[in-house]
Each structure stands twice: as structure tokens, then as C-alpha cells.
Image (cartoon, rainbow, N blue to C red):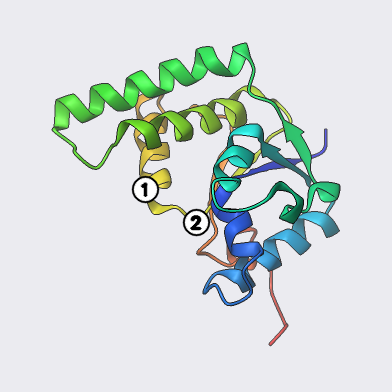
Amino acid sequence: MNKAALLDTSFFIRLLKENDPLFKNVNDYFKFFLKNEITLYVSTISIAEYCVKGSIDELPLKNLRVLPFNIDHAIIAGQFANILYEKRKKDNLISIERPLVINDAKLFAQAHNEPQINYYCSSDERSFQLYEVINNELNSKLKFQFINLREPYSQVFGLLDFKS
């Protein structure tokens, strides 16, 4: 089975803004994924988030598969959101905000539920913290790897990068 990555909203914001500090990293990931035939998915949730300030025609849809949010995703997202809400109550964490948790939980549910998805790509540090909370609660049983786009692809995938 081929590998696949679910790209979050931050991926597209950085990819489409050449003066963004993470543009080079994200652009390198994009090229690496395409070169290595790693299928790229965008969730309808991320499209909605992007369209708050951007336009759908800006997204590189010809290189992406659109992943609709479905009932199986909704069931798992509810479980993930509950884990986060319980953690917030238990540890009195104000940093876990309800609207953000809902979208992160939905995206994580999609990545977890779709067997072809191996990677979830984001530059959002808060999203990574939420991923860790859920993954720890599930005893490291999330079925995808969180890729922090702040780290170069060559480091994440253990490759030598001879480009200057």
C-alpha cells in the first residue's frame, strides 16, 4: 500500500506564502511527497479553515485528494475531543480551547481512521501538544505520525540533503 499524508491548513498557508519563514520547509516537503509518490490529502475541514481568508482556487487541488469528513470520522473525533476536554478539566488547562480542539480532533480522527494515511503534517505547535495528549491517552496507538513542519523533511525522513 502506498503511503499518504494529510496536510492541515497551516501547510497551505505556508506553502502559498513565499515570504513565510517556513515556506522553504513546506515547499521541500511538498516536492518530497510528490517525488516519492506519497499521496497528499486535504480535509474538507482544512479547506473550510483556509477559505476563511483565502480562496479555494489558490489551493494546489490537482496534486491533492479531498477527504470529506464522514460519520466514521465523527465518532472517533468525539472520542478524541472527550479525551482533550477531560484532560483540560483534570489539569485545569486553559490552553485547550473548544473550537480549536474540535477541528484538531476531527483532523486527527480522519488521519487515524483512514488506513492509507501515515502522516499528519502541521506547523501548529498547539496541534502537536493535542496530538501528544491523545496519543498518550491511547498508549501510543494513533495510527499516524505527526510531522512538525518546523523540522526539515531530510531530518524527519533521515535523508541527507546536499542542496545548499
Label disc, if present, on residue 55 of the rendered structure: none
135 in relation to 57, above or below: above
Residue 32 x/y as whole percent: 76, 61
Residue indicated by mark 1 = 126
- Kindly identify the residue that appears in the image at 63 percent across and 73 percent down: 24
Left or right of 84 on screen, residue 119: right
What is the crowding at mark 2: few (fewer than 14 residues within 10 Å), some, or many (at least 20)? many
Q: Quadrant of the C terminus?
A: bottom right
Where on the picture, by quarter, is residue 91?
top left
37 in relation to 90, above or below: below
Residue 122 x/y as whole percent: 53, 51
Identify residue type, mark 1.
Answer: Arg
Residue 145 x/y as whole percent: 56, 42
Left or right of 118 on screen, residue 108: left
Q: Which one is in front, 122 or 10?
A: 10
> Helix, strand or loop at disc 2?
loop
Number of numbered markers: 2
Asked whether residue 121 appears in the rendered view, the answer is no
Residue 57 x/y as whole percent: 76, 51
Identify residue type, mark 2.
Answer: Ser
Where on the picture, by quarter, is residue 69?
top right
Residue indicated by mark 2 = 123
- Kindly identify the residue that appears in the image at 77 percent across and 63 percent down: 31
> Helix, strand or loop at disc 1?
helix
83 in relation to 61, above or below: above
- Kindly identify the residue that appears in the image at 54 percent across and 53 percent down: 10
Q: Residue furthest bottom?
A: 164
What is the crowding at mark 1: few (fewer than 14 residues within 10 Å), some, or many (at least 20)? some
